[in-house]
Image: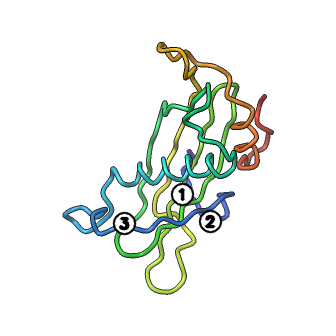
Amino acid sequence: MSTARPTRADYVAWRVATSRWRDDDAYGHLNNATYYELFDTAVNAHLYEATGVDVRALPQIGVVAETGCRYFREIGFPAPIDMGLVVDKVGTSSIVYRIGLFQGGSGEPDEEAAAEGRFVHVYVDNTDPARPSVPMPDVIRDAVTPLFRGSQPPSA
């Protein structure tokens, strides 16, 4: 991940999540685990919408191999959370996503991310109990290629 604080311009696709009262911890800010739920939702909701299929039922499924989060400022209930999504790398069997979380107070939303997540999917054989790594399905590659932003096109 870059060391600079990301802005809205760094992301390609967007979705809005409604923050909930229960998402805040005892200190009044979003619980750390909720950030990861939002990352998972941003990625998988995009895959469902962009592919038009139940991605859980494919012969090859994406499992989370790595996650991380950089926190820049607190966010929490009751304001909605804008989730920006971009793909940094598409390999043969893996995808590296970045997800920016943005939340404004009163008025216009923030232009700088409150947090940024890194989320890596590795595709495995959903029909084999050992779940070996396999090339991702074309339907997934086609869904994530438009999210790529970088100096080189995604690899095949």
Q: Is residue 56 above or below residue 113?
A: above
Secondary structure of residue under mark 1: strand
State the quadrant of the N terminus: top right
Query: For the point 48% across and 76% down, which residue is it?
Result: 104
- Along the polypeptide, which appears first: circle 1 or circle 3? 3
Residue 118 in the image: x percent, y percent?
52, 44
**Position of 62 compared to 87: left or right?**
left
Query: For the point 70% across and 43% down, which residue is it?
Result: 144
Of 1 and 28, which appears nearest the observer? Answer: 28
Say what amino acid the circle numbered 2 marks.
Answer: Arg
Residue 129 in the image: x percent, y percent?
47, 15
Q: Is residue 153 above or below residue 13?
A: above
Q: Crowding at label 1, few (<14), some or many (≥20) Cα neighbours within 10 Å?
A: many
Assess whether mark 2 and mark 3 are in contact (beta carbons under 8 angstroms).
no
Q: Which mark is residue 8?
A: 2
> Would you name the residue on which mark 1 appears?
100
Give the Cα separation between the discs numbered 3 and 2: 17 Å
Q: Crowding at label 2, few (<14), some or many (≥20) Cα neighbours within 10 Å?
A: some
Q: Is residue 38 above or below residue 75?
A: above
Secondary structure of residue under mark 2: helix
